[in-house]
Amino acid sequence: MVEVKVKAVNHDYFVVCRAADSFLILDELEKKLCACAFHSGDVFKAFFVFECAVDEAFLIEVLKVCQKTKTMFLGVKETKKDQALQVYKEKLYAGSQVTFLENTLICTDIPKDCFVVSHASLYVVGKVYGCIDFLHPECECYASGYENARIRIFDTNYQNLTFFCAQTIYYENQNILFNDQRRLVYGL
């Protein structure tokens, strides 16, 4: 199955391409880009997102298609398939110790005095009150809120965090950083 979609996001265009084999995309891509260039009247400018394996030869062919259709190539992103998300529905209790080996959705609060060790990212529907130790630098924590939560990622010290809204906690340059999810969703 070959799928090429053109999406407009904040006055930028993204061409999202999905296929089992990357070279199957080229014909469909040329048709879509010709239509977009015709409607834009001017040079059509777009970023490209490929949800398949991309190599140098394929990118050269994409650039040839862009040249033929008068499309300005602004950039490319190759997305990898996310690993499956494990769902943890059991209630966590104070004093319990839990270890997660893959990305996990936790459908409850993490209570005070609960100790969680994770090798991958955690998505917490409730609030985090307990202690979470992430063992790898690419691990992230998404939660509805944090109240006196103790969190450590990779080689950082434990941080005592309190946020009353959704936050993403992640690791960068030996520091724990966070993003307010309201800004990403609502543009605040």
Image (cartoon, helix red, strand yellow):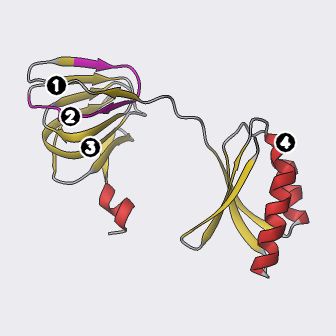
Q: Nearer the viewer, mark 2 or mark 3?
A: 2
Camera-side mark, 2 or 4 = 2
- The residue that label 1 is drawn on is 92
Position of the C terminus, as image quadrant, is bottom left
Disc 3: CA contacts within 10 A as few (<14), some (14-19) or many (>=20): many
Stretch of the chain drawn in magenta: 98-112
Tag shown at residue 108: 2
Residue kind at label 4, given as amino acid type: Phe
List the single residue furthest toward the bottom.
41
Q: CA distance from mark 2 to mark 4?
A: 44 Å
Residue to which mark 3 is pinned: 143
Q: Position of residue 52 (x, y in %)?
A: 70, 39
Q: Quadrant of residue 99?
A: top left
Spatial CA distance of label 4 from label 3 is: 40 Å
Chain-order first, disc 2 or disc 3? 2
- Say which residue label 4 marks: 23
- Image x and y of residue 134, in percent: 31, 28
Query: Which residue is pictured at 70% across the width and 65% down the height?
Result: 46
Looking at the rendered structure, the kind of residue marked 3 is: Ala
Q: Earlier in the sequence, mark 4 or mark 1?
A: 4
Evaluate if marks 2 and 4 touch, with contact meaning CB atoms under 8 Å apart: no
Q: Residue at x 14, y 18 (%)?
A: 96
Answer with mark 1 or mark 2, whichever residue precedes in sequence.
Answer: 1
Do labels 1 and 2 touch, CB within 8 Å? yes
Q: Is residue 114 left or right of residue 47?
A: left
